[in-house]
Image (cartoon, rainbow, N blue to C red):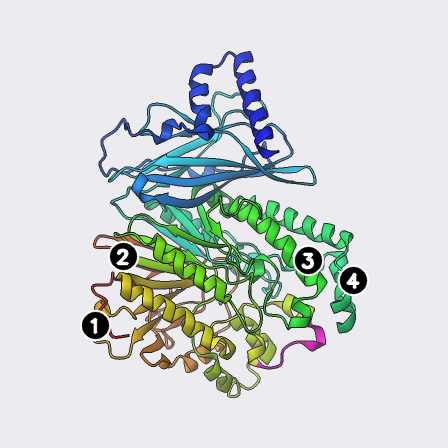
């Protein structure tokens, strides 16, 4: 059905060209993108392949297209290094059945490229269209790719609304941004007054992009806060029931309709709002999801709640729109979007190349989650195989994106620290701050909520996940040793900035230690940070401790001074909003700069963490 719809759409554009007297011959040549030929992939380049500065964008003019309900939204899929090919897509949502083609201008080509809309899915008269984009990369020259729609409201205009994005040069640095926790939870008081809303750090990210463009931005989870799905009348009625009734309640058609309506409308509103909407159309996204993309704490509830009909129905609806809005796909087309599901039948994992020297792994740590498990054995086996297959001879870095930090103060030690804090914070409120949990988590559990630390099991640092954490680390250590790659973790969720590391117990030189793995912690780009009491308690628990017989773990000091210039007592974790800038430097080094919001909510202070390539990997296993 999709192929017939897209064929009819292409014929319609041809007829429109004839009626309007357009250059049908040029358009015909470029219409064959889906049928084998794409002029943007020709080897002939019209410019010298030299490193030159690309033109900049005037961001004030960047807005969502008014002819659609949402979009355009860019997604980065992969680089096929041996073919010098960049793959990605753009997404729109519209009520129209005949959306225009996308026009693509590569400044190194003599002809424009065209991408026809491919219908992905429809919901209640709203249609999702994906535009596939493929481009060739030069060796030394970054490209500024401009794009626009062939018509606006059905007519060609002399000055169409335009957007742009940058693709890297294969032999030059691949630059990207990382963010997480892109919304406010209900416990943040007066976000506009206290934090100047959601825009300040997105403004800072685009300012950095303007200085030196990002080739992608990685959403590490909680790109959208969907906790208010529980505020729909149907869910309020469900929450009013006692525990036994909640668990037994069916996910009826009216509940399904209400939940799907919430997710659809919230995505439309969120992706169309503020500076974030600009970034979505200027920097191609690579996303993994976490609990707030579904519902606060989803996956970590007691089994009777997690597996009940209503919770499973909420999860299915959230997954449907996550795949549509954030991955430009449906459940049936995720493989074409570069996502993979293991033999467990759950989850959408991603392995992608950030140029020729970096491989990025984004496991789906939410879809298979239970109180005891984060990833299934089948998924570990699949990811191990895929990573080894996708590592190139030129790959020097393997980056693992996890929703919650792998290296974090040991929460078994933190339990003792709680007892010394008296009434500084209530126990439940404090735990919520540590785990990024909000009132929605407590609303579902009601009077049957967790009383002990191990009941909040979202974190890798919780005791219940210790063995699985070892399993993941040892899998990656084997890859680092056998393939001579440096492994780095990056994650958010905890609304704190910081860094940590794993390292070999007998190591004397981090550059030659394959077990030396840096953890970057960056969140939140929007949500409010926890109070200082949390930072003090976490520092008290930030000890060096043993992960296994040959590996130790510790937090590292990154923050000698606050953004105000004041000396900090606690230097390992900082409770201010932040995002992370990642630059590939000469010599295959990576510089992770945690950009921490200034007190006046204008601009950021930079805290860099340098990650060197692995020099050798000689170690007895």
Residue 226 falls in image quadrant? bottom right
Q: What element carries label 1?
A: loop
> Measuring 59% from the left and 34% from the top, which residue is drawn there?
2
Are the residues at dot 3 and dot 2 in contact (C-beta closer than 8 Å)? no
Q: Give the magenta range.
A: 445-452
Mark nearer the N terminus (4 vs 1): 4
**Sequence order check, earlier mark of 3 and 2:** 3
Query: Which residue appears farthest toward the front when viewing the image?
Result: 343
- The foreground one among 317 and 566 is 317
The x and y percentages for residue 503 are 30, 74
Identify the element where label 2 is drawn.
loop
Residue for badge 3 = 313
In this figure, what is the number of numbered marks? 4
Mark 1, Cα crowd under 10 Å, few <14 / some 14-19 / many 20+, is few
Q: Compute the Cα span from label 3 to label 1.
A: 51 Å
Task: Give the CA separation, mark 4 to mark 1.
Answer: 60 Å
Whether residue 57 is visible, yes or no, is yes
Q: Are marks 4 and 2 in contact (CB under 8 Å)?
A: no
Q: Which of marks 1 and 2 is in front?
A: 2
């Amino acid at each position: 059905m999709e192929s017939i719809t897209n064929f009819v759409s292409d014929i319609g554009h041809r007829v429109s060209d004839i009626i309007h007297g357009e250059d049908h011959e040029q358009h015909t040549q470029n219409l064959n993108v889906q049928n084998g030929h794409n002029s943007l992939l020709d080897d002939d380049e019209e410019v010298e392949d030299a490193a030159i500065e690309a033109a900049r964008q005037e961001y004030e003019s960047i807005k969502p297209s008014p002819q659609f309900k949402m979009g355009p939204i860019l997604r980065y899929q992969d680089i096929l290094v041996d073919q010098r090919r960049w793959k990605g897509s753009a997404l729109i949502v519209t009520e129209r059945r005949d959306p225009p083609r996308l026009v693509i201008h590569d400044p190194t080509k003599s002809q424009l490229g065209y991408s026809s809309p491919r219908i992905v899915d429809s919901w209640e008269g709203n249609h999702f269209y994906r535009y596939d984009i493929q481009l060739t990369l030069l060796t030394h020259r970054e490209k500024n790719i401009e794009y626009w729609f062939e018509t606006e409201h059905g007519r060609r205009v002399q000055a169409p609304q335009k957007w742009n994005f940058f693709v890297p040069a294969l032999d030059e640095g691949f630059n990207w941004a990382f963010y997480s926790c892109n919304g406010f939870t209900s416990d943040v008081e007066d976000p506009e007054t206290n934090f100047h809303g959601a825009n300040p750090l997105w403004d800072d990210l685009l300012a950095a992009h303007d200085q030196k463009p990002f080739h992608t931005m990685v959403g590490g989870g909680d790109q959208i806060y969907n906790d208010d799905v529980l505020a729909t009348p149907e869910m309020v009625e469900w929450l009013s029931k006692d525990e036994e009734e909640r668990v037994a309640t069916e996910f009826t058609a009216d509940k399904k309709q209400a939940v799907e309506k919430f997710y659809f409308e919230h995505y439309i509103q969120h992706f169309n709002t503020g500076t974030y909407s600009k970034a979505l159309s200027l920097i191609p996204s690579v996303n993994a999801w976490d609990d707030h993309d579904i519902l606060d704490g989803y996956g970590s509830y007691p089994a009777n709640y997690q597996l009940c009909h209503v919770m499973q129905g909420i999860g299915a609806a959230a997954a449907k729109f996550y795949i549509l809005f954030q991955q430009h796909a449906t459940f049936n087309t995720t493989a074409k979007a570069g996502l993979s599901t293991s033999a467990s039948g759950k989850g959408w994992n991603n392995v992608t190349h950030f140029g020729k020297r970096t491989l990025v792994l984004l496991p789906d740590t939410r879809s298979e989650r239970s109180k005891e498990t984060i990833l299934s054995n089948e998924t570990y086996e699949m990811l191990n195989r895929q990573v080894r297959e996708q590592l190139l001879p030129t790959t020097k870095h393997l980056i693992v994106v996890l929703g919650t930090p792998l290296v974090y103060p040991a929460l078994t030690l933190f339990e003792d620290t709680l007892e010394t804090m008296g009434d500084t914070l209530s126990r439940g409120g404090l735990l919520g701050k540590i785990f990024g949990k909000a009132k929605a988590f407590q609303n579902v559990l009601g009077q049957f909520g967790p009383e002990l630390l191990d009941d909040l099991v979202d974190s890798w640092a919780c005791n219940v996940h210790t063995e699985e954490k070892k399993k993941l680390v040892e899998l990656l250590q084997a890859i680092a040793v056998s393939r001579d790659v440096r492994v780095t973790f990056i994650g958010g969720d905890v609304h704190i900035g910081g860094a940590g590391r794993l390292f070999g117990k007998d190591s004397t030189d981090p550059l030659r230690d394959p077990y030396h793995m840096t953890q970057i912690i960056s969140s939140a780009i929007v949500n409010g940070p926890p109070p200082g009491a949390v930072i003090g308690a976490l520092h008290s628990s930030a000890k060096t401790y043993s992960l296994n017989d040959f590996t130790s773990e510790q937090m590292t000091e990154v923050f000698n001074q606050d953004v105000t210039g004041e000396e900090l007592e606690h230097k390992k974790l900082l409770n201010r909003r932040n995002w992370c800038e990642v630059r590939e430097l000469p010599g295959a080094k990576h510089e992770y700069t945690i950009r921490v919001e200034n007190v006046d909510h204008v601009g950021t202070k930079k805290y860099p963490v340098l990650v060197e390539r692995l020099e050798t990997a000689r170690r007895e296993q």
